[in-house]
Each structure stands twice: as C-alpha cells, then as structure tokens.
Image: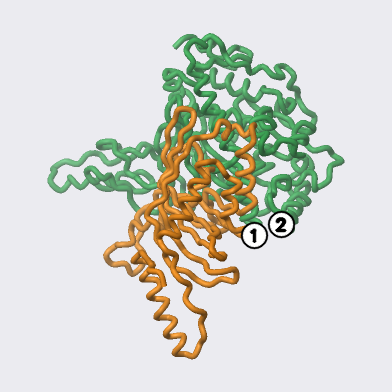
C-alpha cells in the first residue's frame, strides 16, 4: 500500500480501518480498502490538467471530466460571527463554512454546472466571434497544497476526495489579475486514469475583483 | 466642467464620452442623482424579523437596512456619530445592537444611540436624541422590493414608478406565490462606468446577436426579438424591453423561461407552461402577452427577466462599478424546478455568466474608449430610431421597435435634467 501523505488522509484512513474492524467483528464482508493516491499520481494529474487549460486545449480538458461531473463555485460573503451551540470557547465563531452558501434550491452558488454547460463554455472559447476570448487571455495556473483526504467505493470505481489550492494568473487588455482559491475534488479512478466527478471551488473574495469567474478553475 | 448641454444634446442623440469618464461629472452625480432619486436596497424578506439587517449602498453612501423592534424597516447611514467609523462591518445578519469598534458607542438596529461608555467618568452627557445614526428620510416598499430616498421632498415611490409598474408586475407578479430574491447577492467589481451596464439593461437588444453571437447566434430567440420585440419608456430613465406576443400565439410561445431552459426537464417545462396558462386570468390578457426581456428602474436597478436575475449598480469611481445580483426564484416552485431555473441565471449572468463575460468585456472597453482625450469633441451616437417611437394601443409608454435607442436617449435626458436640478425635461 502506498503511503498516504497527509495527516488528514492518514486520519481518515485510520478511522476507516477502525470501522472496518468493527464491521468484520459483526460478521460483515467489506471490499478491500481503496489504496490512497500517491503525491506523484496526483501531481501528474493536476499539472497536466493545468497545462491543458493554460494552453487553451479546452476540448482535451473536457476528457479529464467525468460525464456526470458537478462543477460548483461557491458564493462567499461576510457574515456576523456566530458560534455553534455547545461551543464554549467560540472556536467555531469564524468557521469558513459560515461564509459560504450551499447549492440547494434556496441557495445561490456562483456556478453550479454539469458536463453540457462546461462543454458549451469550452466550445464557445474557440470561436472567432467569442469576444471575451478573442484575443484570449494569457493564463498560468499553479496547483499546490495537494491533500488526499480519503476514498470510497462507488459503482463506477474508486472515488478519491482530494483538496488543492489554485493560483491563477490572468492577463488581458493590459490588466493583470490573480485568482486564488481552494478546490475540493472527487476523482474517479478508471483503470490507470482519473476523471473529475465533482469539483467545488472556493475563491478568496467577497466582492470579486477579477474580470470574470466564468473561467475553468 | 463645461455646459451640461455639451455632454448630452437636447434630443439625446449625442452623448459625450466624458459622461462616462469625467471625475467632476461623477462627483455631481453623487449629489444630484444618488441623493435625490429612489434607490433599490434589498427585498423585505432580507429584513423580515426584528434585528435583521442588510448592509448596502445608496450611491457611495453606506447604509444599514434593518428591521427594528417595532417591525418597521429603518435605513441608517453606516457611520458613527462620534468619529465616523462604520458601526456594522458584516454584510447581513441579526443583532440587537451595532457597536462602534473605536470607542464603543452603541446603537439599536433602528439607529438610536443607546450607550456611550465614556459616561462613566463624565459629569454631563450629550443629548442622545441628536446623536443617533443619520436616518434616511424616505423608505418605501413595492412588491416586496425596498427602496429609499435621501431627499425628503421626493415624490412618493408609487408616483416615481408610475406606469413602469405595469411591466414590473409582468415579472414580479408572474408566479402564483410571488418571487423571492436568493442571496447573499453575488458582488463583483467591474472596471467601467456605472451607467454602461444600466443603459444596456434598459433595452439594448441591438447588441445581442452580435456581441453574444458565439453563444446565441442563429437561435430562435433572436428572431422572436426581431419579430415581436419592443422597447418601451413609460417615463424617461425607466425602460422595459419586451416581446409582445400576437393575440393568436400559443401558451408555449408566450411562456416565460421556456426558451432558455437548458435541460429537457418535463417537470420544469410543465411548471412554466402552467404559470403561463393561468396568467391571463390572474393578471390580465395584456399581461399574459408580454414576454419580458429586461426592465430598468432609474437610476440603477435592472431586472433581467429572461434570465431570472435582479441587480443594482453601485458607483465606485468614474471607471469602477460594483454590481450586486440576486437570483429571482418563484417562491412556491418545487426544489427541482428551482434548481433547473437557477441555471438560466448563473450560466448566463452574474460574475461567472457566459453572456456577462462578453458584456463585461464590452463595458470595460467602452470605458477605455470614453477616456480618449483627443476624442472629447466626438460624442457617441445614440440616435437609432429617433422619432420613430409611438403610443401603443395596448401598452403604456412610448413604444419603439426592438432596436430603437429611445430608452437610452430618455435615460440621458433625465440624467442631464437631474444634474441641472430644477430644469424640466
């Protein structure tokens, strides 16, 4: 078994082992624990993905997405501090979760898209009359702080939860902008390759100052 | 600054580039536009319970909209009477008091000064009644939308909206349970002048097949706009772009939203059709034939009906505007319908929207063009369709073809009259 390289990952797989032991004690038969993804596997995947996007090879990028992808950009605002009940030392008062809104029917994420919508964006970007992409921006994506959080079996293969940070430099019309954010992905392992089944992006803005968040993060 | 008549010609057909780029013009707008007109704040839902508050801006003036212990809406300027700091530093929430961080002066949510901690070591106290947060004198509600005005002498909101209410009803009263604004609003800073997005959403159908050609080129909706689209102006500054469907048209052709539904979701389609079938009886046969595109309420509120979003443009500088937008959802629609409808907003508009990307690019580039000094005597041409607008047998206001720019001429004529306060149009 390759070594999980984050403490969170170790913690989660450790907890999974405990629960498996309990299950076997009760006589249940569980499938073998999925192996964690190695740092080099994840880096290879994310670096290639970033390069496809920076080289504007959007149609090739679509191939790293699972057909059932859900692609979400959370909205973020400035709430009043609020501690959860039972939290005596107020350590939850400034939890980031208070600053984001969900994706249910009474919520308003910045984007909540499926494969069709991502395809429409990719398809548009290459057209000569797509005026927000002609001329195209110069971009450079940097992916860091990769954490493997755990994995689970699904009907389609093993599903890995992975967190990473993204720095996206963007230059167009003489302006320079930098986007920073965190991505929380579910990556589906299919044979030797990975597909993005879900991506949830949290950008570090309440008032967005970049020219658009209609980009691929 | 030179004569206002050099900025906007009498007929509204020529608009100086400096209208969008001049600092002195911008400064004058703060006093003459944003301190005199009714401005949209938020929905009543956002401040429905005592202690609820929502922070926003009236022009550049920061205000707190709050529901007091009395259940009424109070709007106060967010600046301490002692040393001027904002007393509320969060976007929204619920509280009993606002406390200034500097010296601890404390106000109730309706703006009344409640506590000055320094009193402990002082013999005489100041008069608390004179030291509350400055209250915005006029607050009113229309269809759940809250507006306020800094001018105590302004006409009532009802008169201010006038016949524009017909077009607002078409969207705000469309759904049997009414609408709700889903937030917190999306907020983004655009490097452009505040009037450029506003002007666009008063009725600029002329850009859509071109700027947005990569997305909507050749689609049926464009032809429908050319066949049935109208620009209407009930009073200068307001504007509504609509399709007025023929009397013989079917519910399928008239139903709002169907043309933009991105998935063939039978539940969603049936919901929209059902709303349409009831409309002639619930509102009126005239309302039922209006398929709205965009609505604009002077000076800076826009509703993009076709994409279920409402937005306000907060000026920040001649070349900076902060846009805030909410998703407008039918209050009683089932969860699946709501999520389906939300794509019509966020895929196209808002800070991540595809059409918005193209619009933003155009508005930023127009601001760049507006700053070219050697073109200061070369105004923009706003004369398309001048004089072709007419009264309409069924619809209120002056009505022009879908590409008539009278909505913009009216806006800038009113804007000029406001800057030159007291001059009649």
Residue B58 in percent (x, y) is at 45, 34
Quarter that holds the N terminus of chain B: top left
Q: Which circle marks residue B102 in the picture?
A: none
Graded by Cα atoms within 10 Å as few (under 14), some (14 to 19) or many (20 or more), the crowding at tag 1 reads few
Q: Quadrant of residue B410?
A: top right
**Residue at the spot 44% in from the left edge and 90% down from the top edge:** A25
Q: Residues within 10 Å of mark 2 (few under 14, many from 20)?
A: few
Residues at circles 2 and 1 in contact by the CB criterion of under 8 Å = yes
Picture residue at 74% right of the left edge, 58% below the top? B266
The residue carrying mark 2 is B265
Instruction: Read off the residue under disc 1.
Output: B336
Q: Nearer the viewer, residue A26 or B35?
A: A26
Q: Position of residue B364 (x, y in %)?
A: 51, 28
Local SS, label 1: helix
- Chain A's colour is orange
Q: Position of residue B80 (x, y in %)?
A: 30, 39
Q: Residue furthest right?
A: B248
Q: Position of residue B420 (x, y in %)?
A: 50, 16
In front of the other: B24 or B109: B24
Q: Which chain is green?
A: B
Residue B349 in sight: yes
- Asked if residue B69 shows in the view, the reply is no
Number of marks: 2
What's the chain of the residue with tag 1? Answer: B
Image side of residue B298 versus residue B244, left or right: left
Please tell me which residue lies in front, A88 or B359.
Answer: B359
User: In this image, B124 relative to A178: left or right?
Assistant: left
In the rendered structure, the answer to whether residue B337 lies left or right of residue B422 reads: right
């Amino acid at each position: 078994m390759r070594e999980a390289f984050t403490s969170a990952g170790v913690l989660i797989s450790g907890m999974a082992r405990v629960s498996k032991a309990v299950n076997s004690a009760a006589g249940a038969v569980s499938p073998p624990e999925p192996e964690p993804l190695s740092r080099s596997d994840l880096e290879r995947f994310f670096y290639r993905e970033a390069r496809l996007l920076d080289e504007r090879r959007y149609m090739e990028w679509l191939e790293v997405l699972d057909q059932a992808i859900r692609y979400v950009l959370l909205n973020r605002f400035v709430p009043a501090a609020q501690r959860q009940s039972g939290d005596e030392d107020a350590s939850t008062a400034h939890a980031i979760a208070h600053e984001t809104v969900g994706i249910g029917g009474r919520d308003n994420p910045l984007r909540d898209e499926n494969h069709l919508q991502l395809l429409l964006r990719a398809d548009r970007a290459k057209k000569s009359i797509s005026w927000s992409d002609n001329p195209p921006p110069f971009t450079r994506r940097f992916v860091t702080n990769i954490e493997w959080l755990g994995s689970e079996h699904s009907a389609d293969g093993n599903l890995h939860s992975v967190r990473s940070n993204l720095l996206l430099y963007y230059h167009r019309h003489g302006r320079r902008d930098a986007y920073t954010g965190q991505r929380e992905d579910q990556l589906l392992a299919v044979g030797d390759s990975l597909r993005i089944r879900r991506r949830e992006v949290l950008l570090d803005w309440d008032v967005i100052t970049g020219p658009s968040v209609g980009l691929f993060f | 600054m030179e004569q206002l008549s050099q900025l906007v010609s009498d007929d509204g057909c020529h608009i100086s580039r400096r209208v969008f780029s001049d600092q002195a013009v911008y400064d004058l707008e703060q006093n003459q536009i944003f301190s005199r007109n009714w401005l949209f704040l938020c929905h009543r839902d956002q401040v429905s319970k005592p202690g609820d508050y929502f922070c926003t801006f009236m022009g550049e003036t920061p205000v707190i909209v709050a529901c007091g212990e009395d259940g009424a809406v109070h709007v106060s300027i967010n600046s301490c009477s002692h040393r001027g700091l904002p007393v509320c530093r969060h976007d929204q929430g619920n509280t009993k008091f606002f406390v200034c961080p500097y010296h601890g002066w404390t106000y109730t949510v309706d703006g009344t000064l409640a506590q000055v901690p320094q009193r402990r070591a002082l013999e005489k106290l100041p008069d608390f009644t004179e030291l509350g947060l400055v209250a915005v004198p006029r607050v009113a509600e229309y269809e759940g939308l809250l507006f306020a005005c800094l001018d105590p002498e302004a006409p009532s909101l009802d008169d201010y909206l006038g016949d524009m209410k017909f077009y607002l009803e078409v969207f705000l009263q469309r759904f049997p349970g009414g609408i709700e604004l889903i937030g917190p609003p999306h907020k983004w800073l655009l490097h452009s002048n505040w009037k450029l997005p506003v002007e666009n959403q008063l009725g600029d159908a002329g850009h859509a097949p071109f700027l947005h050609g990569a997305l909507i080129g050749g689609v049926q909706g464009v032809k429908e706009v050319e066949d049935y689209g109208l620009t209407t102006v009930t009073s200068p500054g307001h504007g509504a772009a609509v399709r007025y469907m023929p009397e013989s048209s079917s519910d399928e052709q008239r139903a709002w939203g169907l043309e933009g539904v991105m998935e063939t979701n039978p539940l969603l389609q049936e919901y929209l059709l059902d709303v349409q079938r009831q409309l002639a009886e619930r509102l009126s046969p005239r309302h039922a034939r209006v398929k709205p595109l965009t609505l604009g309420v002077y000076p800076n509120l826009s509703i993009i009906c076709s994409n279920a979003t409402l937005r306000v443009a907060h000026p920040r500088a001649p070349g900076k505007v902060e846009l805030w937008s909410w998703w407008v959802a039918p209050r009683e629609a089932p969860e699946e319908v709501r999520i389906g409808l939300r794509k019509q907003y966020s895929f196209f508009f808002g800070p991540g929207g595809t059409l918005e990307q193209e619009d933003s690019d155009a508005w930023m580039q127009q601001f760049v063009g507006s700053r070219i000094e050697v073109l200061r005597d070369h105004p923009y041409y706003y004369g398309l369709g001048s004089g072709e607008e007419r009264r309409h047998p069924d619809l209120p206001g002056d009505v022009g073809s879908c590409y008539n720019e009278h909505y913009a001429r009216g806006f800038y004529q009113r804007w000029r009259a406001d800057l030159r306060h007291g001059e009649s149009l």
